[in-house]
Amino acid sequence: MSARLNIVPFISVDHMMKLVLAIGVDRVLTDLAAYIEEDFRRWDSFDKTPRVASHSEAGVIELMPTSDGRLYGFKYVNGHPRNTRQGLQTVTAFGVLADVGSGYPMLLTEMTILTALRTAATSALAAQYLAPKGARTMAIIGNGAQAEFQALAFKALLGVDRLRLFDIDASASRKCLRNLAGLGFDITVCASGQEAVEGADIITTVTADKQNATILTDNMVGTGIHINAVGGDCPGKTELHRDILLRSDIFAEYTPQTRIEGEIQQLPPDHPVTELWQVITGQAPGRSSASQVTLFDSVGFAIEDFSALRYIRDKLPATGFFEELDLLADPDEPRDLFGMLLRAKAAAAA
Amino acid sequence: MSARLNIVPFISVDHMMKLVLAIGVDRVLTDLAAYIEEDFRRWDSFDKTPRVASHSEAGVIELMPTSDGRLYGFKYVNGHPRNTRQGLQTVTAFGVLADVGSGYPMLLTEMTILTALRTAATSALAAQYLAPKGARTMAIIGNGAQAEFQALAFKALLGVDRLRLFDIDASASRKCLRNLAGLGFDITVCASGQEAVEGADIITTVTADKQNATILTDNMVGTGIHINAVGGDCPGKTELHRDILLRSDIFAEYTPQTRIEGEIQQLPPDHPVTELWQVITGQAPGRSSASQVTLFDSVGFAIEDFSALRYIRDKLPATGFFEELDLLADPDEPRDLFGMLLRAKAAAAA
């Protein structure tokens, strides 16, 4: 066998940025949405399980595995809302794609940036099926790390080019405004959530507090709106007033997980919810009237990460943005693991 | 904050070998047993969950997480019995130790070698409580990748120095004999399992077939023996005849997992089993008579990997056998993930 069995390609943060910039952020978002859509179309091919979460007072560490029977992927991701006070990211992530046939990892990659991209791509993909026709104006409430990615994804996939930004911390909105300058948006920074939603076709909520909050109250949401609720993503963390949920048609990624982690944790466990894959495959309607309020209750799901890992794997050969990691013990004879150690000792002594 | 938040120490296979050789294999095995014993003593401090397994026709890929509330660890491990036919390892593994407070990974390490070491250390630790007093002779049935590690751990922790080896593939026994030459053992290669167990105080079974096999039949096991059953470690994979189980006192790591994966999957779900931590803490007896047959039904548990990850972390500063991995996105301002991408673009254009 090849002497390279020990090597797993590794995509560092630096390489991920180079890869994304070489392809172009808009193109990556569009491509990721296509990969996710393709995998959601073959929903039944996947092992699905709610993520494996380890909760603590400070936050949560989660493992999100899935497999389509040929490839296996998992992501490690944390969520620690108070991290920013120490200059740390709220969310960091890395992931692995592996070959089901051999169990060998095929790549290891940073996924903080990749998660930001796939989350935005998933939101925009859902909005293609759920947002009102011709939507051009989006309110973004919560202008943290995810905000620009959401804006760019909705521009790339739906043509949204008017943004109304609000954050309880005005410096976050200014950061967002600065970063999106020159990228083709007409941007209004607003003084309240109420002001932000005025005239919006789409409302994206993406705040970071780990608690039940009410970012949107019922009177703020008019008819015909699509709500893209991204920030409610763990038990006890929601963003929308319950009354909004009661007059919305609700769409989720994977209902058993969303009932635990999403906005719908506020509702009885039998409240009707449509899964996005059902809409994508035509088994359920998406938006069916101009006056309907649609809600995508997004908590993020392992298949989206799987799709993102597949995408990175496909882009590696042409872009070459990876290192080689000596991750897997590869003795000359598979059963001779101890012999490998002995030979390393002999080599060191020579 | 430091500009080093993006860095996670990585221990490659090469560095793990250097670390183990620098400390010495015997010392590492003894140290690991002490770390595992320490963690088993504080059993109640840990989040415990059966591993998250993804089974396929070819094998299994598992994630094994646990946490003591301050540290979080998980291991990725596969088990693919037919891999050796393609020159691949049956088992490969890597793992991560993380800080519960921030969710940030603290180290990423190869764990193929480390798992071989901790498995053997756990077996020997259990045998310290369960094997007959003064045991010096061990039969090892199955002479694959784990065999030498078992031998060395039992020598280091119990003084076992007479080995009786058997494998259905004689070349595996010869490999084992060759690797252990000069390490202080009196070794007999045997022509059958029956011959191997003659005069043995301890019988270690560690074969690799993913199926119900009968490596030991009832008539092969005399009174007073300790059986260290390492190879039955997934559903449908067992090594011992059921009759042996019925006349043994059975000890396990974490019973809910062992009932699914261990030898005791052959028994009713209420068959009495003692957990090893209960023996270590003195809440339950280990070996209580010279005639008793004791059985350690070992399938491997996440806390053992956690202990091994802790050990490696403690050894890193002094040994320096690690690389720095650019794994975590670390923008100057935590909410400015997209700005980091923009600055990378500007830097590339400059």
Image (cartoon, coloured by chain):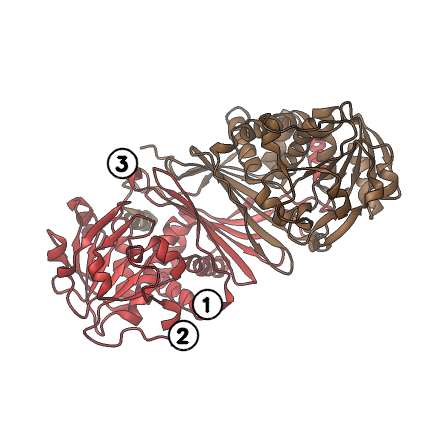
Chain colours: A brown, B red
Label 1 with label 2: CB-CB less than 8 Å: yes
Identify residue for label 1: B43
**Residue at 78% across, 22% down:** A134
Q: In front here: A137 or B87? A: A137
User: What subunit carries mark 3?
Assistant: B
The amino acid on which the numbered mark 2 sits, given as a three-letter code, is Thr
Q: Residue A96, percent across and down?
A: 50, 40
Q: Earlier in the sequence, mark 2 or mark 3?
A: 3
Residue B281's disc is: 2
Q: In front here: A292 or B183? A: A292
Label 1 with label 3: CB-CB less than 8 Å: no
CA distance for labels 1 and 3: 39 Å
CA distance for labels 1 and 2: 9 Å
Does B317 sit left or right of A14 as displayed?
left
The amino acid on which the numbered mark 1 sits, given as a three-letter code, is Trp
Q: Earlier in the sequence, mark 1 or mark 3?
A: 1
Nearer to us of marks 1 and 3 is 1
User: What subunit carries mark 1?
Assistant: B
Nearer to us of marks 2 and 3 is 2
The amino acid on which the numbered mark 3 sits, given as a three-letter code, is Arg
Question: Could you say which quadrant of the image residue A153 lies in?
Answer: top right
Identify residue for label 3: B85
